[in-house]
Amino acid sequence: MIFTMSSFPPVIFLVLVFVPSILSAPVTSLTKDYYQETCPDFSKIVRETVTTTQGPQGRTAAGILRLFFHDCFLEGCDASVLIAKNALNKSERDDELNHSLTEETFDIVTRIKAALEESCPGVVSCADILAQSTHDAVTMIGGPSYEVKLGRKDGFESKAHKVRENLPLPNHTVHDMMSLFQKKGFTLKEMVALSGAHTIGISHCKDFISRVIGPQPDPDIEARYAEVLKSLCKDYTVNETRGSFLDPVTPDKFDNMYYKNLEKGMGLLASDHILFKDNSTRPFVELYANDQTVFFEDFARAMEKLGMVGVKGDKDGEVRRRCDNLNKANGSVAEPDKSFTGGNISFELNL
């Protein structure tokens, strides 16, 4: 993800031992009413901006949610993913795995920051903007509400070379993904709950095409669904923006359809499908497919936990005046927005 979240390890993942991670231990105290005195309009400004920029098929919510996950899983929730590159440094945004983070999503954070700087200059961190806007975007399309504690500071470092070793890949096994989640203090069940973020958003053809076209297509993928994907991706080699909704049934709604799709062989990415195929994660997929309330409760708790990963305090962070930390006139170059052109593929298979 969230995510571009994108196996068969045996019993080792049935019993997990929690190993504390430096990134999972907050170094500062966060509170829900952190800006009550210093920026009383904080929540109002964030929510109004997110509301006015909400795109079709949940694209805005999916983009912000993915941005938040990609931020927290590297240097912690410190807005390091927002920093633009300069002549001396390639930032997290420059790694290929982060090219799916659209300029549209970065612009939303920039708009919120600009409005807050007018209302209460130098007070609100970009990390808190990202945390709050993620919550608001998710709830606006039907997702669960959860507590967002505030008071994060913005980090000083953003390195492109750290991205690939910290983010799940589309072809990862349960073992691969869990090794990353466990380092951040998450359990196997929490990993499956957070994977439910794939109930919204899209993925480009290059991330899943080998499952339907090639020398070894995945026999587990539902046949009619595979044909739809082949059609959508027929020219993906010349049009890299081609792709598909992660949830083709209810792409504009945050619900538990993602898990129901997995049960029917309609997981888009190999890393989605393996959650149902692997014996250690299948019970959680079945649980969430059968009970959306339980999924919402577990997702909410996991998001609260995600928001505490690697939090920076005053000693190792700051409140940036600009979230990209650089004046674009002085050499900052943003990644282009590669718009999704997969079209509206929402459909009912009546499986």
Image (cartoon, rainbow, N blue to C red):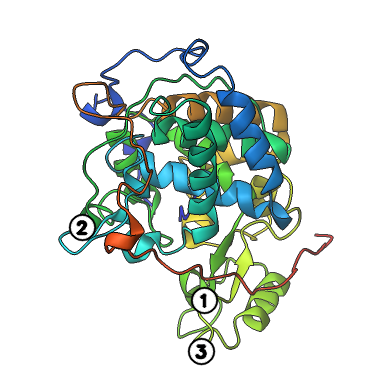
Q: Classify residue 226 as left or right of residue 9.
A: right
Query: Which image quarter holds the C terminus?
Result: bottom right
Task: Find numbered disc 1 in the image and state the secondary structure of the residue it sits on.
Answer: helix
Task: Find numbered disc 3 in the image and state the secondary structure of the residue it sits on.
Answer: loop
Residue 32, how many percent across, how many down?
50, 14
In this view of the protein, which residue sits in the foreground, 270 or 162?
162
In this view of the protein, which residue sits in the foreground, 211 or 315?
315
Report crowding for label 2: few under 14, some 14 to 19, many 20 or more residues within 10 A (C-alpha): few
Going from N to C along the chain, the mark reached first, 1 or 2, is 2
Going from N to C along the chain, the mark reached first, 3 or 2, is 2
Report crowding for label 1: few under 14, some 14 to 19, many 20 or more residues within 10 A (C-alpha): many
Comparing labels 3 and 1, the label whose residue is closer to the camera = 3
Q: Classify residue 148 as left or right of residue 56.
A: left
**Residue 332 visible (yes or no):** no
Report the residue marked by disc 2: 161
Report the residue marked by disc 1: 209
Q: Amino acid at mark 2?
A: His
Q: Amino acid at mark 3?
A: Val
Report the residue marked by disc 3: 238
Residue 46: mark in rendering = none
**Residue 299 visible (yes or no):** yes
